[in-house]
Image (cartoon, rainbow, N blue to C red):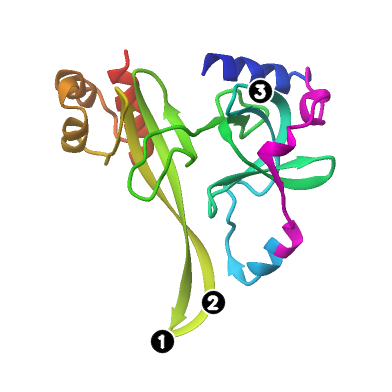
Amino acid sequence: MKKIIFCLLLLNAGYADAQIDGVRALPLDVTLRLNAMEYAAKYADVEGSPFLANDYKKAYVRIKGGQSFLAVPVKFNVLNNEIWFKQKDAEMILLKTDSIAYLNNPDDTFSVVALKTGYPDIGANTGSSLYQVLADGNVQLLKYYKCNLIEIKDMNVVVGRKFEIVPEYYVFSNGSLKKIKNSKKSFKEVLPALESKIDAAFKTLTELTPEIDMIYIVNQINK
């Protein structure tokens, strides 16, 4: 994570230009060209967006196999759980993603969005599924963006459709991935060996929002 943040600081300071890595393009075997206009037309009547953010962000990108790239314009399609990026004005899908990181707000170095694959299968999620890393350490707090396409009804008549994003939270520790809720009971169920640290963390918790609370608890556990 420290390496990712350092790369983002370099990127934000202007050490990488708007082209992919300033020099290199991503290998063809990890990309898939898409028709963005056709995709947009498919969901033109749907309220909301299938993207975490609609605009492209300059990102640090690492692909499976170890190659990394700076200043890749990316956006996260949460409906399909995939990364879109621009390469020479073409919009592409990134395959074989290992990790992605970008600043959600270029003026705020604390607004890092870090996305990662490679976690164990759980439910419908696989090792290729992208999670946002909210807290890092021996225990990781992960967020999965589940995006549903739902019908809007009026008097039982379908009058439209909308995207609905439902966040799911997980902890990853000692090679195990488990779903978690924002409660002391849930933390103790998924991390039984850390019960004393969980008790101590909850004693100092100032309740804000469920997500911020969980980030605080995991950061305290990792101290």
Asked whether the residues under the numbered discs 1 and 3 touch, taking CB atoms below 8 Å apart as contact, a structural biologist would say no
**Cα distance in 3D space between marks 1 and 2:** 13 Å
**Cα distance in 3D space between marks 1 and 3:** 52 Å
Which quadrant holds residue 211? top left
Residue 25: say if magenta: yes
* Circle 3 SS class: strand
Residue matched to label 3: 68
**Which one is in front in this view, the residue at disc 3 or the one at disc 2?**
3
Q: Amino acid at mark 2?
A: Gly
Residue matched to label 2: 160
Q: Which mark is residue 171?
A: none
Q: Nearer the viewer, residue 27 or 122?
A: 27
* Circle 1 SS class: loop
Left or right: 164, with 120 as reference point: right
Question: Is residue 70 among the parts visible in the rendering?
Answer: yes
Q: Nearer the viewer, residue 161 or 26?
A: 26
Give the magenta range. 15-38
Residue matched to label 1: 155
Determine crowd level at label 2: few under 14, some 14-19, many 20+ residues with C-alpha closer than 10 A. few
Q: Amino acid at mark 1?
A: Met
Left or right: 23, with 137 as reference point: right
